[in-house]
Image: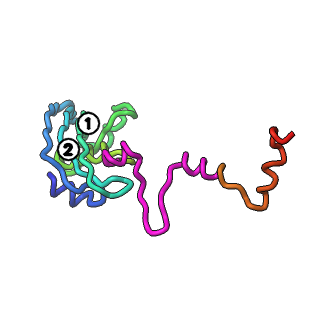
Amino acid sequence: MSDSLKQRFPEQVLDSSKFEFKGLATADNGSVIIDATIKGSLVVPSSRSLQPVTLPIDTMISEIYVEDGDKLDDYADDEVVIVVDHDKVNITEAVEDNIILQVPMQILTPEEESKGIMPTGNEWSVISEDEESEERTQKVDPRLAKLKDLFDEDSE
C-alpha cells in the first residue's frame, strides 16, 4: 500500500508502514456496510520545515456502499454512503482515502513542537503571532518617540 499511497498522494505521503485492516462487511438489501479499524503509520512532511514526521494512524471507519443512487435517500445525511461503480467495492482505495483523512493540517517534528522552532533563511525568519504582536508594541515610530514621555507619571 505504501507505493500506492505515495503515487496517489505524493505531496502528503513520504512513506508508510504496513497497515492492519480488521473489519466486517455486511450485505443488506442491495447495500454493503463496512465497519473496520485501520492501524499503521505514515511518514509525512512537517508543515513548517518539510522534515519527515512519523504519524501513527489508528482509526475506525464505517461506510455504506450502494449499487443504485436511488438508495441514497434511505440513509441519514450524516452517514457515509458511496455509490459503487461496476458492482465492485475497491476496499484498498477506501482504506487509502480514510488514511489520508487522518493527516492533520499542521504536523510538526517533535523538536519543532517542543522548542517552537520556526524556519529561517537569508535575512528572513518566520515568527509566531505572539512574537509579532510583542514586536509591534515595542516598536515606536521615531516621529512619535518624544510623545511617549508626554504622559509619564513619574515626571510630574
Percent coordinates x, y for residue 20 in the rendering: 13, 39
- Scheme of image coloration: rainbow
Residue at image position (21%, 58%) is: 6
Q: Give the image quarter of residue 64.
A: top left
**Number of marks in the image?**
2
Quadrant, the C terminus = top right
Magenta span has 135?
yes
In this view, the residue in front, 72 or 148, is: 148
Percent coordinates x, y for residue 10 in the rendering: 26, 60
Residue at image position (84%, 48%) is: 150
Label 1, label 2: how many angstroms apart (C-alpha)? 25 Å
Percent coordinates x, y for residue 36 in the rendering: 19, 33
Residue 6 placement, left or right of 120: left
> Which residue in the structure is indicated by mark 1?
64
For label 1, the SS is: strand
Q: Amino acid at mark 2?
A: Ser
Q: Which residues are magenta?
A: 108-136
Magenta span has 94?
no
Sequence-wise, the earlier of marks 1 and 2 is 2
> Which residue in the structure is indicated by mark 2?
41
Residue 84 placement, left or right of 153: left
